[in-house]
Amino acid sequence: MQDIHPDTKAHVESPNPPPPEPSTLKPETSKPIDDVKITITDKPASAKENRIADNSQIKNIEMSDPQLPDQPVLLQVEQDSEMIDVQSYDSQTFSVSKDFWTHASKNTKSIFAKLPVQYDKNFENPCFWQKFEGDISADPYLNSPYAPVPGEERQYDPWGHNNYYRKARAQFIGRLNKNETGTYRFRCLPYFYLISTPKSGTTTLWNQMVKHKDVDLRIGIKENAWWNFMRRGLRGDHHWVYHLVNPPKDYLPNDSLLETLDQFMDLFDNEGANFRRTFEENGGNFVSTITALAPINLLTAPIDFWEELHPELVKAGFKSPPLYLHPAYIIQKVQPEAKLVALVRDPTERLYSDWQFFNKKSDKKEFHELVKHAVAQFQNCLDEVS
C-alpha cells in the first residue's frame, strides 16, 4: 500500500507499525455502540459538466475537507487519541485515530490507500475510476470467493452468482476506459447500509426496496459479511453462539479466509456498469440510481471476541473494546456520506424467532432456560466491567 502521508500532527514511519508496549496504551471510556449515530447532509443533485471519460481528472481533484457533521460523536472515539493523516487513492488524506492505525490489520489499512476522498459527483452512488494494473486478457474474477469457476455452474446458487459473474466476465473488457495515463475500471461501493440483527425484517424491507426505480439491488449481496468478518479473515458462520459454547478454532483470523477490498467491490461491477450506461444515455446528466448492502450483524458481531483478536489491549487494561475497532468507524472515515438504515424489533420476539430459525426447534422451555443462562452470564459481565 502507499506510504502514510506526513503532516504536522504526526508521522508514522511504517504502514504496519508494531503494537506499542501495553504501558503506552490508554483505556478509553467506552460507550455503547448504540450511542454512535452517524448523520449526514444530503449532497446537491447537480450534474457535473464533464463526463468521466477523460480519466486524467481522477488524480487531481480539488475539494475541501470532507464534512463530518456529528463531531461530538467522533470525539467519543477519538478524544484520547492522537490523529494522523493517511494517504488516499486520489493523493489526498484521511484523518484517523493513531490508536486505530496501530491495531488495524494490513488488509484494513489498504482500504484507505485504495479509496478516494472524493467520489465521482456525476453519480449519487459512491463510485470512482480505479487504475487497472492487471492483465486484461486474464479472468478478473478468478480469485473471487463469490464467482463460480469459469465453465462451471454452482448447483446451489440462491444468490444468483452464476448469472451475475457470467455477465460481468463477458462485459469486463468493454467496460474498461483507456487514455494516455492508463487503463481504468469503474468501481462502486454501497450508497447505504441496511444494518440490523437477524430476524428483524431486513429481508422484507430489502425485497420492497428492490422494486424502487432508483435502487439497483440484487438478493445475492444482501447479507455479505465483508465489513465485519471476511475483511479480517473471520468466519461469517457463528451459529455456535446459540449453543453457548466457545467458538471453533477456525473462527479466529485465518489468512485463507481473508478477502480484499477489490474482491468486495467486484460485487458491484454490474451495478456500476448500469450507472455508467444510464449516464451516457442521459447525455451526461446526474445519475440518481443507487445500490446498497445489508451486512450481517454489523451492529454487534464485528467486536465479538476482541480479547482474542487484540490481547495487547487486554494487557493494557481495557475491559471493553474501544469503538474504533467497530467497522462503522472505518465506513464513517472512507464514506462520510454513507446512509445507515437500522431496523429494530421487540427483543424477545426477535430472539425467539432467531433461535427457532437457526436451531429448527420450538421448545419454549428449552429456550427459556438458555435465555436465563445467557442473562446471568451477561449480568456477571456487567458486574465485572462496571
Image (spheres, grey):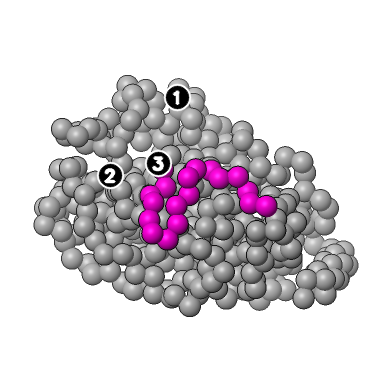
| Left or right of 337 in this view: 83 | right
Task: Tell me where residue 334 appears, x and y as whole percent.
Answer: 41, 57
Task: Report the residue marked by disc 3.
Answer: 2
Task: Report the residue marked by disc 1.
Answer: 150
- Image height check: is 353 above or below 278? below
Whether residue 17 is in magenta: the answer is yes
Name the residue located 61 percent from the left edge and 33 percent from the top edge: 256
| Three-letter amino acid code of the residue under disc 1 | Pro
- Image height check: is 290 above or below 104? below
In front of the other: 217 or 228: 228
- Mark carried by residue 17: none
Circle nearer the N terminus (3, 2)? 3
| Three-letter amino acid code of the residue under disc 3 | Gln
Which residues lie in the magenta part? 2-21
The answer to the question of whether label 2 and label 1 lie on touching residues, with beta carbons closer than 8 A, is no
The answer to the question of whether label 3 and label 1 lie on touching residues, with beta carbons closer than 8 A, is no
Task: Report the residue marked by disc 2.
Answer: 129
Circle nearer the N terminus (2, 1)? 2
| Left or right of 140 in this view: 47 | left
